[in-house]
Amino acid sequence: MGQDKIGVCVDMTSASIYKKDYHVDWGDVDFKKELKLSTLFSFFQDASSMASEELGFGIEHLQQDFGVAWVLMKIRVDIVRNPKVGETITIETWPLEPGKIACDRDFIVRDGDSNILIRAISSWVIMDMHERKIKRTSTVPIVYPFGENERAIEGKLGKLKVEEPLEVAYQKMIGYSDIDFNGHLNNSKYVDYMMDCFQVEEHQKYKVKSIEVHFTNEAFPGEVMALQKVMVGQEEVYIEGKNDQSEKVIFKSKLIIEEV
């Protein structure tokens, strides 16, 4: 992950930032009564969709008029404190100027006193839902109300790799409850799969300080994913998912953990 400098989003124009409140309910938390990472990813996806809707390019408009959808490719999340059940949090999100292929989108999560709880940076691409191919960002003529190009986290989402041999944690059959409206494994489900690589006792002892995930290939219902992991030092865990039959890498991830 590196020792990236943290930036604070303070000077951006209000027009460039989309904000939405989320109440953390009992169904959103784990046994520690803290927001599950998978739920946080779902909140990020919802906020991104609503921000696009506000710009006139919501999910249905993209599918019906252009035959495409935004697909998350990379994301890094740094956690100061996990929200707890009963809290109302505010997610702020804003886009960066699109490149030819990808568009970066940042997130800040605040508590009721406006304290920053979580920071995230992400990279999205436009996928043709019929051909399952990535298209140029110019495919969709969205005009973004850009403010200052400040980042929630300074630094880029580079490559994830590990030299140590991986060990299989478990295998998972992808089913109906795992897929989303795009017909493939939803990004929040990947996070649940990663968290299931650890025993409950490990979750009691450690917490996730940072998580970075790169989604490299789609996964579909009926496929079996082999989850593999390895500890890198005392604080890093590398987790990778492969198609059990083709051995194609579906995702790569790196977690920074610390004792509770």
Image (cartoon, rainbow, N blue to C red):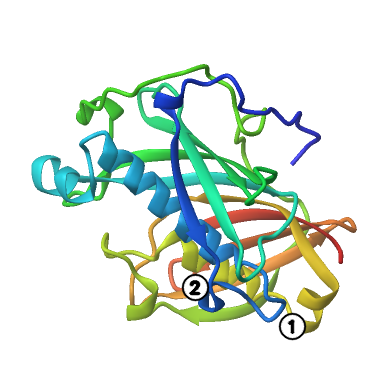
Label 2 belongs to which residue?
Answer: 225
**Residue 250 seen in this snapshot:** no
Horizontally, residue 234 falls left or right of residue 120, namely: right
Residue at 62 percent of width and 51 percent of height: 112
The quadrant of the image that shows the C terminus is: bottom right
**Mark 1 nearby-residue class (10 Å; few <14, some 14–19, many ≥20):** few
The quadrant of the image that shows the N terminus is: top right
* Front residue of this view, candidates 79 and 173: 79
Position in image of residue 161 (x %, y %)? 67, 47
**Residue 213 seen in this snapshot:** yes
Position in image of residue 172 (x %, y %)? 50, 80
* Front residue of this view, candidates 142 and 74: 142
Position in image of residue 81 (x %, y %)? 74, 55
Position in image of residue 41 (x %, y %)? 51, 57
Vertical comparison of 152 with 223: above or below: above
Secondary-structure class at tag 1: helix
Residue type at tag 1: Val
Residue at 88 percent of width and 55 percent of height: 233
Label 1 belongs to which residue?
Answer: 200
Residue type at tag 2: Met
Q: Quadrant of residue 30?
A: bottom right
User: Is label 2 or label 1 in front?
Assistant: 1
Question: Which mark sits nearer the N-terminus, 2 or 1?
Answer: 1
